[in-house]
């Protein structure tokens, strides 16, 4: 993903808007404008084009996809929507990334490395999806879009925003119905149906007080089809209903206060069926309920010094067929971070103290700085060191072998702890070349891995130390006012420091590269993006990777005086070279296919 020429403001680094030039953490921001240039239809597909983020392509079309950052595991990455957490107590990972309407997203902020001093359990990083910002002065506009592609796929999207009196609003949604992509010889049933909605209403009775209400719905039913390597198929239903009510007060120009109430109810149901008889081999039903609240104060002492302090409180309840009864967990945490700026240096320090009823207490400090290099205009050095942790999901501690199976619980499992260091340079040369280069290293203590116990059953166990390190680089070259080239690369490895062996088979990439070529002239636009991934997959996955997969987007916008405010015709071509590709033989990516559609703005 290219580095934007206009540097954005980020929220996730300090839980309040901060210009990214003052942020010492290694953060990538994907803006709304960049999202619209990509041949992507959900946040997971957007993340495919970011070099240091792994979003396994799987079979696309809304199928569930794990995501990781810089070689971390997916459960170590905290995924949020406006600060609402989505990682479940079943697997530790989030399942929402394919089930969000992309039109409702303002930007995607990716924090790389431990972010526990701000957000708690997040040893691998944070992905925060920031929704559209609206106010009582938002001008009205709407969009409807229809798109069709191969595999009997059709989708409809809408977006509308505006204001009425003291209220601002934003609503967006998507309906998707897709067929299967597997070869016909293996198909039992494979299809996906999604219904997504995201709404926000902001009430601003005065300049000193506002109330923001957000509500989202995600319904996703996926039939995986018959697996190529064994005669089974999987049917999965995912449902999420989430929301937030936020009260903001501005008693003075130097202070902001916020009280937020969060809710997230997720359920996952799955059936494992024997083909072709459709005999139900196993079923699972899990419900993850989250309720949380938070208080935050932002104090600006002057133009150079500010303090953010707050307190989070959250409750999780897990109900699942893997346990005889439900389990609850309460988490509370005070936090604070302070930023001081003396040109050309900006320094940030933070700390958070998490108290988890099941997994104990964690103190997570962090410190970093940004130095603008005087003799190199628009060039800076940034560095950050942070102590972080990732708490395991409740299921790993309380899994009960109600029906004979191959897994057992571990009542002694502990949180993983990490010490993460990120450092690098970024800059711009004559508004022609934007670039960045950074290195990272993380030592994970009590790292969790799956092993066989003495009874030949799988169990999650803590190991002593894993070392995770790598480097990444991004650049964008403006070849002309109409043409731009982008390149990004990431290389990492993970070593078990007890044995000295490389850790593999975790479903993450060891190296990846991204290429992009974007052209825009008047009403025409064209873009080609290339993705190259080298996965650490196990031998049993029969991996078929290490090749570039190219996607293309073509679009033409009819001037607004013809139809409404403008009509855009577009064609997306995926896997241009028609390559066979998969990180796991059971989840092949589609061969070359086409998608076309029309978007009407009014």
Image (cartoon, rainbow, N blue to C red):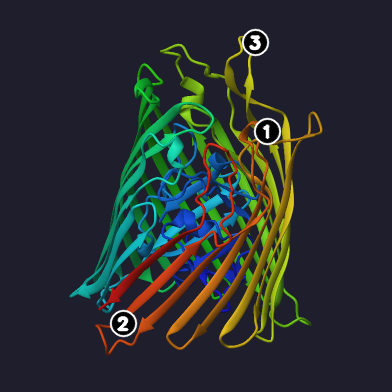
Image coordinates for residue 287, horizontal then vertical, percent = 34, 32
Position of residue 73 relative to residue 138, above or below, is above
Q: Give the residue pinned by disc 3.
A: 454
Asked if one can make out residue 51 in the rendered structure from this viewpoint, the answer is no
Location of residue 224 by image quarter: top left
- Disc 1 crowd rating (10 Å Cα; few below 14, some 14-19, many 20+) is few
The reply to whether callout 2 and callout 1 are in contact (CB within 8 Å) is no
| Residue at x 56%, y 57% (from the top left corner) | 578
Q: Which quadrant, please, contains the C terminus?
A: bottom left
Image coordinates for residue 255, horizontal then vertical, percent = 42, 67
Q: Give the residue pinned by disc 2.
A: 566
Q: Give the residue pinned by disc 1.
A: 539
Mark closer to the observer (1, 3)? 1
Mark 1–mark 3 distance (CA, rounded to whole Å): 24 Å
| Residue at x 41%, y 74% (from the top left corner) | 253
Image coordinates for residue 527, horizontal then vertical, percent = 53, 73
Nearer to me, 294 or 73: 73
Which callout, 1 or 3, points at the residue further toward the start of the chain? 3
Which callout, 2 or 1, points at the residue further toward the start of the chain? 1
Mark closer to the observer (3, 2)? 2
Image coordinates for residue 398, horizontal then vertical, percent = 47, 20
């Amino acid at each position: 993903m290219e580095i934007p020429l206009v540097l954005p403001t980020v929220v996730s680094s300090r839980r309040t808007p901060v210009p990214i030039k003052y942020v010492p953490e290694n953060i990538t921001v994907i803006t709304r404008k960049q999202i619209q240039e990509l041949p992507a239809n959900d946040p997971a597909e957007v993340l495919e084009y970011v070099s240091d983020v792994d979003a396994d392509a799987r079979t696309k079309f809304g199928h569930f996809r794990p995501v990781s950052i810089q070689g971390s595991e997916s459960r170590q990455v905290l995924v949020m929507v406006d600060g609402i957490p989505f990682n479940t107590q079943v697997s530790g990972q989030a399942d929402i990334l394919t089930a969000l309407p992309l039109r409702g997203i303002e930007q995607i902020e990716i924090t790389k490395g431990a972010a526990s001093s701000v957000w708690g359990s997040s040893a691998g990083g944070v992905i925060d999806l920031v929704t559209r910002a609206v106010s009582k002065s938002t001008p009205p506009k709407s969009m409807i879009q229809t798109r069709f592609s191969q595999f009997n796929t059709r989708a409809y999207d809408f977006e509308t925003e505006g204001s009425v009196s003291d209220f601002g609003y934003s609503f967006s949604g998507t309906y998707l119905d897709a067929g299967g992509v597997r070869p016909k010889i293996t198909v039992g049933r494979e299809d996906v149906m999604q219904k997504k909605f995201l709404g926000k209403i902001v009430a601003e009775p005065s300049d000193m007080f506002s109330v923001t209400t957000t509500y989202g719905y995600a319904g996703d039913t996926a039939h995986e089809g018959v697996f190529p390597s064994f005669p089974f198929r999987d049917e999965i239903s995912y449902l999420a209903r989430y929301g937030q009510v936020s009260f903001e007060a501005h008693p003075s120009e130097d202070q902001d206060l916020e009280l937020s109430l969060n809710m997230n109810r997720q359920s996952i149901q799955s059936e494992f069926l024997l083909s072709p008889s459709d005999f139900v081999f196993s079923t699972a039903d899990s419900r993850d309920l989250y309720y949380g609240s938070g208080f935050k104060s932002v104090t600006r002492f002057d133009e150079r010094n500010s303090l953010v302090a707050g307190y989070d409180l959250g409750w999780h309840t897990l109900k699942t067929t893997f346990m005889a009864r439900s389990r609850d967990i309460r988490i509370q945490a005070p936090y604070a971070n302070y930023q001081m700026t003396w040109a050309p240096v900006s320094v940030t320090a933070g700390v958070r103290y998490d108290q988890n009823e099941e997994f104990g207490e964690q103190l997570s400090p962090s410190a970093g700085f940004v130095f603008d290099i005087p003799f190199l205009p628009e060039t800076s050095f940034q560095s950050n060191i942070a102590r972080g942790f990732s708490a395991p999901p409740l299921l790993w501690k309380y899994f009960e072998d109600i029906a004979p199976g191959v897994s057992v619980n571990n009542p002694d499992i502990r949180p993983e702890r990490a010490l993460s260091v990120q450092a690098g340079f970024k800059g711009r040369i004559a508004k022609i070349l934007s670039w960045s280069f950074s290195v990272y290293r993380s030592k994970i203590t009590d790292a969790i891995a799956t092993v066989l116990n003495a009874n030949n059953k799988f169990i999650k166990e803590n190991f002593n130390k894993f070392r995770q390190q790598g480097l990444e680089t991004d650049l964008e070259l403006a070849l002309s006012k109409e043409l731009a080239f982008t390149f990004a690369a990431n290389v990492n490895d993970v070593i078990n420091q007890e044995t000295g062996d490389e850790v593999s088979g975790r479903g993450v990439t060891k190296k990846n590269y991204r290429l992009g070529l974007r052209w825009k002239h008047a009403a025409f636009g064209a873009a080609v993006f290339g993705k190259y991934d080298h996965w650490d997959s196990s031998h049993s996955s029969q991996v078929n990777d290490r090749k570039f997969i190219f996607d293309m987007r073509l679009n033409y916008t009819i001037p607004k005086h013809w139809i409404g405010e403008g009509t855009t015709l577009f064609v997306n071509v995926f896997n241009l070279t028609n390559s066979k590709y998969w990180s796991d033989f059971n989840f092949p990516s589609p061969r070359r296919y086409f998608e076309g559609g029309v978007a009407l703005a009014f």
